[in-house]
Amino acid sequence: MGILCLAAYLRNKLDVDLLLMDQRVENASVESVVQRAADFGADIVGLSLMTPFASMLGPLTQGLRAALPEAFIVVGGPHVSAFEAGALAGNAADAAVPGEGERALEQIIRARQEGANLTSIPGLLWRSGGDDITRNPGPAPIVEDLDVLPFPAYDLLDVTKYWALQPMAHLPPRKYLSFFSSRGCPCRCIYCHRVFGKRFRASSPERLVAEIEHYTKAFGVTHIEFLDDIFNFDPKRVLAICDLITKRNLKLRINFPNAIRTDVLTEEVLDALVGAGLYHSAFALESGSPRMQKFMGKHLNIDKFLQGVRWATDRGVFAHGFAMLGFPTETEQDMKATLDVACNSRLHTATFFTVVPFPNTELYAYVAKHAPDKLKGVAYDAVEYTGSRTNLSEVPDEVLFGYQREGWRRFYLNPGRIARIARDYPYPWFLPYYIPQYMLRATKGLFAKG
Ligand code: SF4
């Protein structure tokens, strides 16, 4: 979605030719990415990535540098928001853009077209000679009014390739489209980068529903998902969006793989969402311990969380939960509380993670100050996030991972829950697909070598 938004913005603002490529979905080698960029004759190459794929940056940028010696290589996406100047270490990229990239990339291209230098682009990280990296003063510029953004450039990628893959949510491969309706989140979770900043900015209901209507009709799709940080920050906006979707008779099937803050949900909002087509949603608990909620800055009201999940499932929504174990200072009592809340909730399914501190978060700063040894050897390259071996808590590794395994077992080996999953999961024929994944996670580490 990031590169679709960037491409749409750039072609709207500038006279540029664009080529988009998703290396992961195309399962493309580094050599073929380089070849495509070289064949295109790229003047500027933008690479957007998440941290688990950062090890590719070295070979990719070096290959691009060799094939396109004059090209300007700029890195962005969540990895840069986390690692900032570190995202330029060990690779041949020229610059990095933390946060959202539309305006920064526009300014970089204008500077390149006009032969100007990069010093006037706020927040930009760039190589100012040898290994020296300069960070320009000021925050990276953002788009204040999301309504001025053009629709994401879905025409520049073969979206059908995504329909053959497992999507982010626990749903089978199917025809669907993703949307961002807002950017930014004012919540204060200490483990989060807030890539889009702390201020909530949102598309108007009219603009958003026009985009949804345009693309669902263009691609003949009814399934959609939202990838916002916090879609339901403004309940009135949610009601207006649902009202428009219903009035325009879009007949959508809506999924939230994230984006919902559960303890502020109301029955009125849930009725509207279900009326607009909501059928599957994730609900982030993270911890069932009020003490840990306070520590992590999420301040989730646990009773209201349970009520929100109950209201949703009463209305036929399939509910997936997220839980995190192993925060600094977390004790066995806190972990038990998380397992109790998750296992006694009306969630249909849940994922139990252990906490990983990402650079440039308050959590990372806390660990760096209080237990710096725990930052040694943190594996940021794992794409199976539940397999992390990092332990920031007060308890030994075997106890933390034991609680994590117990979470999987207690949650799923419950006849009532199994019956509810079988009854409510929208694609029952797909359930066996998850059994190996469950076994892997429920036995985490037990059969690992070394
Ligand atoms: S609610 Fe989500 S997006 Fe907002 S600060 Fe917490 S983790 Fe980040």
Image (cartoon, grey):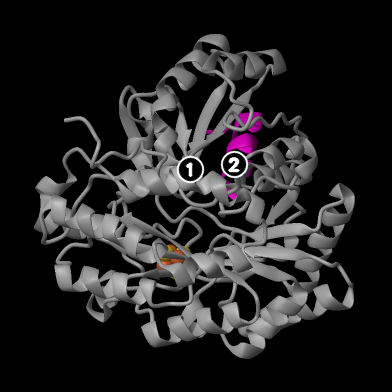
Marks 2,1: beta carbons within 8 A: yes
- Asked if the stretch drawn in magenta spans residue 263, the answer is no
Percent position (x, y) of residue 206?
80, 72
Q: Which residue is mark 2?
A: 105
Quarter of the image for residue 139 reads bottom left
Residue situated in front as seen by the camera: 109 or 398: 398
Span of residues in magenta:
103-117
The quadrant of the picture showing ligand 1 is bottom left
Secondary structure of the magenta portion, mostly? helix
Is 305 on the left-hand or right-hand side of 209?
left
Residue 101 vs residue 443, the one in the foreground: 443
Would residue 231 be found to the left or right of residue 413 on screen? right
Q: Mark 1 vs ligand 1: CB under 8 Å?
A: no
Percent from the top left, x then y, of residue 3? 63, 42
Disc 2 from disc 1: Cα separation: 8 Å
Q: Is residue 191 visible?
A: no
Q: Earlier in the sequence, mark 2 or mark 1?
A: 1
Quadrant containing the C terminus in the rendered view: top left
Task: Specify the label residue 97 is tagged with.
Answer: 1
SS of the residue at dot 2? helix
Residue at 74 percent of width and 61 percent of height: 148
Count neighbours of disc 1 (C-alpha within 10 A) and say few if under 14, some if 14 to 19, many if 20 or more. Answer: many
Q: Position of residue 115 (x, y in %)?
A: 60, 28
Amino acid, disc 2: Leu
